[in-house]
Image (cartoon, helix red, strand yellow):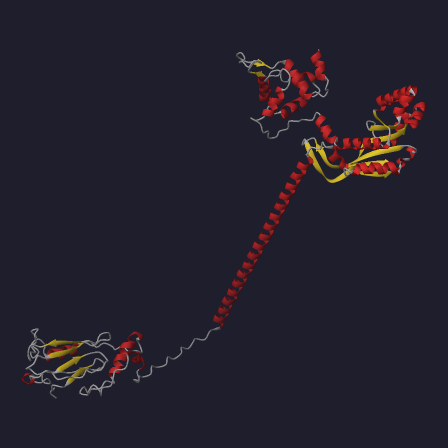
Amino acid sequence: MPLSRSDTVLVDDYDDQFFNLSQATLPPSSSQGSVDFLELTDSDDDLAESRPPPTSSSPCTVPIEISSDEDESLYETPYASSTQTKFGIDLDSDDDLPSMTRFAQEIKNRVPVSRRTSFNDPSSSELSSKRRYSDHFTDDATESDTDATPSPPKKSRLYSTRTRSPSPVPKPKKRASKTAEDKARAQEEKEKKAAARAHKKALTAAEKARKEQQKILKRQLQDIDKLKKQEEKEQKQAIRKANNRRTDKKKAVSDMTIVLATTFGKDFADLLNEKMSEFNAKVKLRAVPPILQGYDCVLFRRWIHRQYDTDERAFVPVEPSFEKEEPAALLRLSKDKLWDLVQRNELQEVVHLLRAAYELPRRSQIFLLVFGLEKVKEQNREKWQRIEDTLTCLQFDEHTYHICVEDDQEAVDRLYNIAADYAIKEEKLVERSHLPFCPNVNIKAAEANDVYRQMLDQINRLTISAARGIKTRYPTMRDLLDKYAELDGNQRMQDKLLEDCPVTQRADGSQAARGGHKLGPALSTRVSTVMFSKDPQELAVKDSR
């Protein structure tokens, strides 16, 4: 059927059929005086209402609709005339188009392409929905704008009511039945995996227990180290406290206990207790041994908190402390009792009984506390002279110490002094002893062993240069004393030990001659006597020769 001016041909790419067009189907060129509208679109939107072209007498425009999902604008191209636009395009000429025969031949020779649907390609769901929507498009393009059905929104196209052919339900694949061997193998693998998990779990538990044990052991070692450090710290503090000088009798007497015989009486015991309690000392009562019946005796006890270590040359603490009875005893005698013993010559025998009763050694200290002897001296000179001679002989024979008092208060004061002397006895013995006094310790002085050199310099006639010569041969006092100790018993070798020590300067400080001088036998003997002699009078005897 020939196309009229208001006819519209819709070419949709959804249909599977090909259009066979030929030159015969088109209207002849003689009847193409009026322009027909051909719209080629793949949009699903409603077609715009076809409008008749303007007459040839007025400039006309050809609406070109470019349909897409993003842009639906209309571009109008004005024509210069009914057959030619102002751009020089002749719309009535078909010379620039291929022939219909060639167009149909190319369509026949085109390789068919399988169509994609939403069933096998999810990415084409939107395109398929657009194509499905074109099925409901009406071919009546002559309807008015008010009667045309509006295009649904794009989001609703996915829910199109177009019927689809249901896809076949996939049949489940049948699993091959397991054989007994497969089941056994699967069971074995399962057991292996379970065993591996159990083994791994056991290893994890063992590792956790090991780490926990290590933590406990580490904590125990840390506690042991802390205890050791604490013990070392306490031991150092105890040693420091033990080596504190105790020369104050009032503080040292607190370690003493005076043991009185019960024969002294309550009044004297109370007076002594009042005196000793001021210094935290104690007084105890004790019965007299049977062999000393009728005599008043006093003993002295001391608490031992430290002892002197000759190897360490220092006091070391004693744990636990204990009470020790001093090798000493005191015998109280009245003037009448003393005169009676002197007349019978039994005073020395009483001293022997006193030592035997308390098991005191021969060199123990015996004190005689005599009351009222001063009055005898004033009243009777002969009696006083005989008593004095007897006491002098007793002092030479038994090394006794005599104390004369007039009343109980004076006797209490003398007992306090004796107890205080015993309290600091160890300190006094160390100070007066000939123990080595320059051990190998760090000495803080101007230079190393400077104190040792200054000690040697104090020896008479020994110069600084001579002291340096001795120090080069024996760097410390300990080395020198040890060498003297090796030669103990050989006095001649001890005296000649230092005679070859070099002396680089004279007494006036000038340089000695080439080869230097030697210390010589005289100064060597003097150093030996001062440093190692046990007799305090030996140096004076040698100097007098």
Please give the name of the residue rendered at 58% of the width and 29% of the height, measured from the top-left corner. Answer: 444
Residue 28 is left or right of residue 13, and the answer is left
Q: Position of residue 309 (x, y in %)?
A: 70, 32
Residue 34 occupies quadrant: bottom left
Query: Taking 412 as reference, is 502 left or right?
Result: left
2 or 188: which is nearer to us?
A: 2
> In front: 388, or 238?
388
- Residue 485 in sight from this viewpoint: yes
Task: Residue 437: give x, y in percent of width and height.
Answer: 66, 27
Quarter of the image with the N terminus in it: bottom left
**152 or 393, nearer to the observer:** 393
Picture layout, residue 104 above or below residue 200: below
Q: Quadrant of residue 354?
A: top right
Q: Position of residue 388 (x, y in %)?
A: 88, 21
Q: The C terminus appears in which quarter of the rendering?
A: top right
Q: Position of residue 290 (x, y in %)?
A: 92, 35
Q: Is residue 16 left or right of residue 422?
A: left
Residue 261 visible in the current orientation: no
Compared to residue 82, the image places residue 363 above or below, namely: above
Tell me the quarter of the picture where residue 371 sits.
top right
Counting every numbered tag in the picture gives: 0
Measuring 75% from the left and 30% from the top, which residue is drawn there?
Answer: 425
- On screen, residue 109 above or below 208: below
Point 64% across, 44% down: residue: 230
| In the depicted structure, whether residue 397 falls above or below residue 55 | above
